[in-house]
Each structure stands twice: as structure tokens, then as C-alpha cells.
Image (cartoon, grey):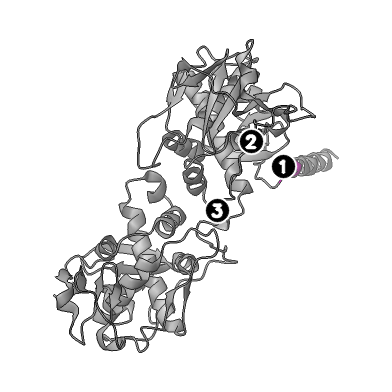
């Protein structure tokens, strides 16, 4: 009897454990980690300050600001909206994220966060550390700790809500994109405060002790405290006739004040939607490793066989309206290499060998990279080549993937170094000149700078600045300019 009772108790305990282990299902399309008793952690001081019970910042102006220096993470200083929105939320609801958000639960590997609009997400300690390094925020230690947490979670929400599959798959890419600047309203919405924000006229913040943010531009905003704008911790004159936002403790019904002055336009600034960074479609399943004998991601061309149809085999696809893609120089560089050394990557590189989930590649300058089959497919989707030779396109995609991998590994930005998708986005969006492309694909020992006069022979193959590829016999009636310079490739 006692043994049967023991078995029954064990069965009930297992059922309870299974019930506890079920993950929390979010109300919104976000990720939330399971919060069992074993995963909840009470100590969260590494990422959160000791502020609680709606305690305001000790110094809302001087306690937090963004780095005014230009760095490799941004071309300007587009973090003013992040700082203004975070300061506004802290001064209104309290400094701690536990007051700004509906719920913050520390776990062994990160935090579950529920925002005031019901959005739920899970953020890992690794993502919090990445955000701390990439936020460019400075200031008081405790306030900075809470600000970095808020910044990290708004980036996480930006990632989860993105329509770009590549950004959805990459936290560093979402952070890099938000670091280009956000509208003040976007920052507040990404913190779950859309239902608590109200649009007002900026001059209304100049009376009394009103608190808000003024919108200077699509990517620049200022906190307003006691009628003065916050300029890097220094009170400055309030700008008039500007769009502004204030926060309310309870959800607001009318999110705009009536505008009686027709000269004042308080409509939200028109922010164009962010286009897909790489147009990458997620793969249903990563491709398996190639067999040592076969290399399915390159053509069967070998031993220096040149392309049969270099003109029509592949080319740069025209950009769609609003699309950010600068890939023409990559096409020119790859075609130049194929015409000199042969179409196959096995000829354009010193060594290509199947290994693990992809290929080990040694470039002609001795630089070694490993590129996976999945990275090759993603690189091809981002490059978007068109043409009538699918095998040549396959070889071009392989070479571009190897270039992108080296671009990732050699980049000075840790966000790019840690993520192939971010490196791919940077390469496709920003483009490169022909010289650094050839250098980073292993051609530095084979490049020779030439004058246009050295490209006049019928069998000349090279690149001319302001003109493009010079293909000699491959392109009849190609009239070169009188003056100019460019590059050719030599075997030695």
C-alpha cells in the first residue's frame, strides 16, 4: 500500500514538473522564456540599478547623455532621440525599468519583459552586453545601467517587429539600424508607451514645470525640463513651433492637442519605412555539408576556363524603388577576376576545399576564411544577380560570400565582426570602390594601376574609373575616353 502511494506521488510530481516546464505563450509575436521556479533569479544588480518605487533620476540632465564623437558605429550623432525618450520615461515613471515596464523578471540567462502595451519579450544577457557596448551612452553609473537596459529592450522589440527576415534573425543588425537614428515617437513606441504618449505644441512645454521631448528632425530630439531643452546636460533655449510629446500615467484617448494655429504642423514627421537590408529570405533548413569529392556551390569549370558569355552571363540587377543596394562594383571586380584567372573560384582563389558545413578558402594573398553553404546562399540572395548563365552566377555568389566573410572578420566594428548578416547588410547597402574590393578578395599582389593608354589593345581586360570594365575583344566597339586610370590584374 505504501509503495503504491509513493508511486502515485511520484507520478503527480512529474506531471506538475511538466506543467511548470511549459513555456509562456506571448500575447504578441515575441519570444518569452519559460519562467519556472528554477529559472527565476532574484539578483539582477548587474544590469539594473537599485532604484525602485518610482524614484526619479538624481540628475536627469547630467546623469545621462550620448557620446558626441563620431565613431565607426554611426556617421553622425543620431542617439539624441534615444536619450530624450529614455530620460522622459525615467523622469515620468521612475528611473528603473521595473517602473517603466509592466513587469521585468530576471532569469538565469536573461530577462522576461512585459511592456505597458502588453508586448512581451525575452532578452539574453549576451544581448544586454552587446547593447551596452553599442549604445554609445555615457553618464552616472546607476542611471547608465538602467538606460542601457531600456535601450537593449527597445532594440530587441525592433528586431522582433522587423519585416526584414535578416534583421529578425540578427540582434546586432537591429542595433546597427536603430543607431542610424529614430524618430522620438518610435523610441517611445518601442518602449511600449504608445498609449501613454500625447502630441503637443513645443511652446506648451515652456510654461510651468512640464516635461516632454521636442522633435528637431526625424532622427534628433531633445528632452524638455522646466521650459528648457536638454543639450548634453546643459539647459538651452526651447525651440518653438516644433512637434513635441508628453507622457501620461494612464492611457490617453486624445493623442493630439487641437491645433488652432494653421502655421504649426504637428503631424508626425514622415519617416519612410526602412527597406529590407539584404532581402534575405530565411532558409527552410540549412543545407547539409558538401561531400569532399563534389562542390555543389560552384560550377564545373576548372583549370582556368574563362567565361563563355561574360557580358550576358550575369549582371547587377537594377534597384527597386526605395531599395538600398550598391553592388555594381562587386560585379565588375568578380568579372575582372574571372576573365584573368578563370571563371571558377578554384582558379580565382589559391585553394577551395569542402570542409564541415561549407568550404575552407585560401585567397591568393594567403588570407584564409571558412564560409558555410548557408552563408553562400544568403550572399547570393543579397547580391541579386541576373543573367543567362546560372553556373556563372553560382561562382559569382561564392566569391562574393568569401569577400563578405573576410569583410566581417576584418571589420573594426564588433557588431559586424560578430554577425555575418550584419556584414552582408553593410557590404550591400554601402558598397565599395573597386580597389578595396579587389584587395579584400585577395588580389592585392596582382593589381596594377594603369593609364587608359595601356587598355587600348584589343585583348586588354581591366577596369577604368568613370567608365567601368574594359573587355577588349569581348566587347566590340568599346570607345575608351582620352584620359583616365584604373586597374588590371596580372598573374604575378
**Quadrant of the rendering where the N terminus is positioned:** top right
Disc nearer the start of the sequence (3/1): 1
Figure label count:
3
Q: In the rendered structure, does residue 246 fall within the stretch colored magenta?
A: no
Residue 111, quarter of picture: top right
Predominant secondary structure, magenta span: loop
Q: Is 352 or 291 nearer to us in this picture?
A: 352
* Image spot of residue 405 (x, y percent): 36, 60
Q: x%, y% of residue 224? A: 56, 19
SS state under label 1: loop
Taking depth in this image into account, of 411 and 86 the one nearest to the observer is 86
Query: In the image, which residues are magenta?
Result: 19-28
**Alpha-carbon distance for marks 1 and 2?**
10 Å
- Residue 370 at what x, y percent from top left? 35, 64
The mark lying in front, picked from 3 and 1, is 3
Mark carried by residue 169: 3
Secondary structure of the residue carrying numbered label 2: strand
Residue under numbered circle 2: 112
Residue corresponding to mark 1: 24
Amino acid at each position: 500500500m505504501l509503495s503504491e502511494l509513493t508511486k502515485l506521488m511520484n507520478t503527480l510530481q512529474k506531471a506538475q514538473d511538466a506543467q511548470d516546464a511549459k513555456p509562456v505563450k506571448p500575447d504578441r509575436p515575441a519570444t518569452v522564456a519559460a519562467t519556472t521556479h528554477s529559472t527565476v533569479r532574484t539578483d539582477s544588480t548587474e544590469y539594473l540599478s537599485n532604484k525602485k518605487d518610482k524614484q526619479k533620476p538624481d540628475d536627469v540632465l547630467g546623469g545621462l547623455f550620448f557620446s558626441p564623437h563620431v565613431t565607426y558605429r554611426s556617421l553622425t550623432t543620431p542617439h539624441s532621440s534615444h536619450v530624450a525618450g529614455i530620460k522622459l520615461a525615467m523622469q515620468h515613471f521612475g528611473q528603473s525599468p521595473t517602473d517603466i515596464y509592466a513587469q521585468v523578471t530576471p532569469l538565469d540567462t536573461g530577462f522576461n519583459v512585459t511592456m505597458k502595451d502588453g508586448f512581451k519579450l525575452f532578452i539574453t544577457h549576451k544581448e544586454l552586453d552587446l547593447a551596452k557596448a553599442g549604445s554609445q551612452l555615457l553618464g552616472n553609473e546607476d542611471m547608465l545601467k538602467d538606460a542601457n537596459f531600456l535601450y537593449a529592450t527597445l532594440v530587441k522589440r525592433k528586431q522582433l517587429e522587423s519585416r526584414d527576415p535578416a534583421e529578425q534573425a540578427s540582434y546586432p543588425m537591429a542595433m546597427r539600424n536603430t543607431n542610424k537614428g529614430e524618430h522620438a515617437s518610435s523610441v517611445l513606441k518601442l518602449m511600449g508607451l504608445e498609449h501613454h504618449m500625447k502630441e503637443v505644441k513645443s511652446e506648451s512645454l515652456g510654461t510651468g514645470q512640464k516635461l516632454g521631448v521636442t522633435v528637431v528632425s526625424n532622427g534628433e530630439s531633445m528632452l524638455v525640463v522646466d521650459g528648457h531643452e536638454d543639450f548634453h546636460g546643459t539647459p538651452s533655449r526651447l525651440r518653438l513651433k516644433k512637434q513635441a510629446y508628453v507622457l501620461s500615467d494612464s492611457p490617453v484617448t486624445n493623442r493630439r492637442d487641437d491645433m488652432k494655429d494653421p502655421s504649426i504642423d504637428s503631424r508626425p514627421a514622415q519617416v519612410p519605412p526602412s527597406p529590407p537590408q539584404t532581402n534575405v529570405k530565411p532558409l527552410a533548413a540549412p543545407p547539409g555539408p558538401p561531400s569532399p569529392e563534389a562542390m555543389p556551390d560552384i560550377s564545373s569549370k576548372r583549370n582556368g576556363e574563362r567565361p563563355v558569355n561574360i557580358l550576358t552571363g550575369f549582371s547587377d540587377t537594377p534597384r527597386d524603388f526605395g531599395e538600398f543596394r550598391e553592388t555594381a562594383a562587386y560585379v565588375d571586380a568578380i568579372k575582372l577576376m574571372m576573365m584573368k584567372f578563370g571563371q571558377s573560384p578554384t582558379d580565382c582563389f589559391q585553394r577551395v576545399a569542402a570542409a564541415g558545413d561549407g568550404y575552407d578558402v585560401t585567397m591568393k594573398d594567403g588570407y584564409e576564411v571558412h564560409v558555410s553553404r548557408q552563408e553562400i546562399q544568403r550572399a547570393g540572395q543579397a547580391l541579386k544577380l541576373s543573367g543567362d548563365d546560372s553556373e556563372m552566377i553560382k561562382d559569382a555568389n561564392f566569391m562574393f560570400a568569401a569577400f563578405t566573410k573576410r569583410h566581417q572578420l576584418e571589420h573594426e566594428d564588433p557588431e559586424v565582426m560578430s554577425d555575418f548578416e550584419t556584414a552582408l547588410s553593410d557590404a550591400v547597402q554601402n558598397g565599395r570602390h573597386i580597389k578595396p574590393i579587389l584587395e579584400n578578395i585577395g588580389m592585392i599582389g596582382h593589381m596594377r594601376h594603369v593609364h587608359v593608354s595601356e587598355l587600348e589593345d584589343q585583348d586588354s581586360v581591366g577596369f577604368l574609373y568613370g567608365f567601368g570594365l574594359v573587355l577588349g575583344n569581348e566587347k566590340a566597339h568599346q570607345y575608351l575616353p582620352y584620359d583616365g586610370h584604373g586597374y588590371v590584374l596580372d598573374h604575378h
